[in-house]
Amino acid sequence: MVAGVDEVGRGPLAGPVSAGACVLGPGAVIPYLNDSKKLSEKRREEVAAALREQAYAWHVAHVPAEDVDTYGIMGALKRAMYEAVAGLLLKPDIILLDGRPLSIWPQERAIVKGDEKVACISAASVLAKVERDALMRIADQYYPEYGFSRNKGYGTAEHIAAIREFGLTPIHRHSFCGEFINPVRS
């Protein structure tokens, strides 16, 4: 049993770091499956829907911004990846990671550019991206001046201007905002 694992949201100023884990069966046919960064938002949604129907198992885990601040991005990323794998209904014998080894599972193999080369890693990437983006659209309803539905928490000019004008929200990563930090907005 092999699970692909990938993370999204490593660099934003706001929102969680998220990780997906996915076990694809040998007969899974997922048109357009690729690294989530190489797909349009509409195409990612279509691919994610097909994955939810055809995957043997999948799970996405989110680690909130305050934990990114507390444990650092690598600590939060490792926790999200571990929780994504641990949340699978089928426990994998081995996990395949995009990038470098993280020692989060007894048997793991890291593959450089794995999200482009290995279907189950691409699947994990897409599922995590779609779910994280959905969370950021919800956050946009609470904090519309930050443009989270458009920027997904990344440091765009619009987002940085909003931080300077309105301060940080509870979903901002204070450790990532440096010079932009103002009192937390409730």
Image (cartoon, rainbow, N blue to C red):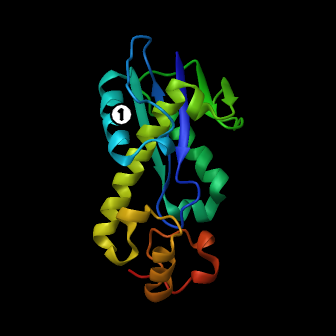
Considering every residue shown, the one lying at the far top of the view is 27
Is 43 above or below relative to 119? below
Q: Which quarter of the figure has residue 178?
A: bottom right
Quarter of the figure that contains the C terminus? bottom left
Residue at 36% from the left image edge and 56% from the top image edge: 135
Q: Amino acid at mark 1?
A: Val
Is 37 above or below relative to 94? below
- The answer, for residue 60, to whether it is visible in the render is no
Where residue 12 appears, as percent x and y from the top left, is 54, 62
* SS label for mark 1: helix
Q: Nearer the viewer, residue 138 or 37?
A: 37
Q: Is residue 134 left or right of residue 157?
A: left
Tell me the residue that label 1 is attached to.
47
Instruction: Give the class, few, some or many, for how many residues have Cα within 10 Å of label 1's Cα (few <14, many ≥20).
Output: many
Q: Nearer the viewer, residue 124 or 157?
A: 157
Q: Is residue 27 left or right of residue 161?
A: left
Q: Nearer the viewer, residue 94 or 31?
A: 31
How many labels sit on residues?
1
- The answer, for residue 120, to whether it is visible in the render is yes
Residue at 39% from the left image edge and 20% from the top image edge: 56
Where residue 162 appears, as percent x and y from the top left, is 44, 81
Where residue 68 appears, as percent x and y from the top left, is 58, 60
Q: Nearer the viewer, residue 86 or 125?
A: 125
Residue at 33% from the left image edge and 60% from the top image edge: 137
Q: Which quarter of the figure has residue 169?
A: bottom left
